[in-house]
Image: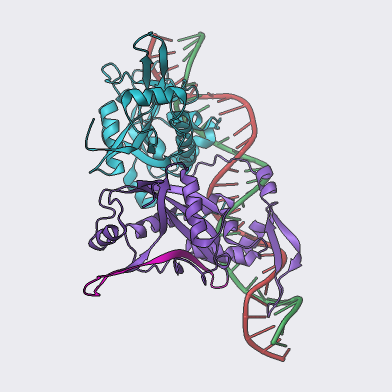
Chain colours: A cyan, B purple, C green, D red
Amino acid sequence: MNSKKIDNISVDCVVFGYDINAKSLNVLLIKRYLESKTTQEVLVNDHVLTGYHVHKEETLDQTATRVLKELTGLTDQYKKQFKAFGNPDRLTSKKDLLWIENEGFNSRTITIAYYFLLKTEDVDLENNPYSATWFPVTALPELGFDHEKIILEAYKDLKVKCLSEPIIFKLLPDKFTINEVQDLYQSILGIEIDNRNFRRKLINKKYIIALDEKQVGVSKKPAQLYMFSKDVYDKVFEKNYLISI
Amino acid sequence: MNSKKIDNISVDCVVFGYDINAKSLNVLLIKRYLESKTTQEVLVNDHVLTGYHVHKEETLDQTATRVLKELTGLTDQYKKQFKAFGNPDRLTSKKDLLWIENEGFNSRTITIAYYFLLKTEDVDLENNPYSATWFPVTALPELGFDHEKIILEAYKDLKVKCLSEPIIFKLLPDKFTINEVQDLYQSILGIEIDNRNFRRKLINKKYIIALDEKQVGVSKKPAQLYMFSKDVYDKVFEKNYLISI
DNA sequence: CCAAAAGTGTTTCTTCTACACCCATGG
DNA sequence: CCATGGGTGTAGAAGAAACACTTTTGG
């Protein structure tokens, strides 16, 4: 056991990855498997988020960053702390108790949940130490602990946030087409968007910059590539106080 | 010491109260005072939020509710968990350490912060066990721990949220005038709003219901009273997917 | 030449904004 | 009768929504 860790406080990470080819918003999960040492009966066989206990000398943000790095090797990804989960019964289902007993941690653990936004293609799953796998957020497998709840809350927050902040571009490559942005919005929100209206709207933004480049290697008309400029966005940005209740 | 409590996890409550007469959005704070037993030197003299450790058998929401009740006697007020604060140095200023030593709690405490929305007039400060006082959110006194940061984050969240959800009415009496709503928005957001446009907008909402009543006891033209109907709101409500980035 | 996706315009409707004066009431 | 805040209307601009066909490219 690691003496640096605070044994009743953890950080759990919902890693959202967008698969631009499959047009699918995915969540990265690890398998949880346990069988009885005596009877070989399968006791636990499901999936969970990655998380880890907070260390005594680190901030919550640092814990989240550390967890992501261990899971994916990635650093500097967009992250957001979105909620703490601390119900006394959150880890008390039968299989969770078995698991906890086996791993030796505190069943009254409060977790601070974060989500990350990145691209599935940036994660190398081949050599992943946790055998992590992507699952579409709309087709989650059986989940341990209260992790389904955590994922759904993260997803809810993401849906709201992507309407008012340009976080969508964290899920896309640096160079993207307008239709890719539209596909992504449609994936996240589960809605259909009119292509003409959407294009006009996006192209008119000063911080959506047309590049001198087109797609290559596609077997159809190659689309114009664009980039998002955070600098321009920050300059242009002005708080609007539109009350829409 | 209370054996029920989890000694490194607390809930802190930012209690927002709107003073409809002063048109002021306030925060309820308690005084923190400590002098040296030997020299009578004042060691700590500032204000803090109320908070308390989470009990082993309660949810975070229950802790928040309990804290509010002890502070104000009120139950059933709107509350929102908005962020966890857990930096290792959040309680390590000189005076905070003195205080912690005196009170005997863990300096590596993580706090789950909530805010409440209510009316100042609903709180009886005369007989308050903590000698709590209201301070305008724009004129906070010196604050202990990281509580200034917590309040400002709560305020930021409130500003965003009041634009998209009808939580504003939690800060107003059941019967209110249109101008009172406008004053409240102006207080919270720190902006000026055109009265004619605002009136039109609000009165057109189906869930803003004109009552058969006018103000009484005012020395001017008494204003029409309205109420907010949550039932109608919930029926009328439809998610809009307006992308405004 | 064909399949596939990129790209393009116009009209209608709603909503936001700007703006200044009269009115009703209690004292 | 006066001070105070309550209440009202219109026109212009901007943005959202609805809607279907042509163009370009690689194979």
Picture layout, residue A27 above or below residue B26: above
- Predominant secondary structure, magenta span: strand
Q: Residue at x 34, y 18 (%)?
A: A217
Residue A201 x, y percent position in the rendering: 49, 40
Judging depth in this view, the residue of B163 and A224 nearest the camera is: B163
Report if residue A222 is visible in the image. no
Q: List x then y, in percent, for residue B153.
A: 40, 54
Give the camera-side residue of A35 and B218: A35
Q: Which residues are magenta?
A: B21-44
Q: Image height check: is B69 above or below A126?
A: below
Residue at 30% x, 24% y: name it: A123
Viewed as shown, does residue A72 lie left or right of B68?
left
- Count of marks placed on residues: 0
Q: Is residue B12 magenta?
A: no
Residue sitting nearer the eye, A204 or B7? B7
Asked if one can make out residue B109 in the rendered structure from this viewpoint, the answer is yes
Q: Position of residue B98 (x, y in %)?
A: 25, 61
- Tell me if residue C11 comes above or below residue A177 in the rendering: below
Residue at 44% from the left image edge and 55% from the top image edge:
B13
Question: Residue visible at 34% across and 36% down?
Answer: A11
Q: Quadrant of residue A239?
A: bottom left
Quarter holding residue A69: top left
Q: Nearer the viewer, residue C3 or A88?
A: A88
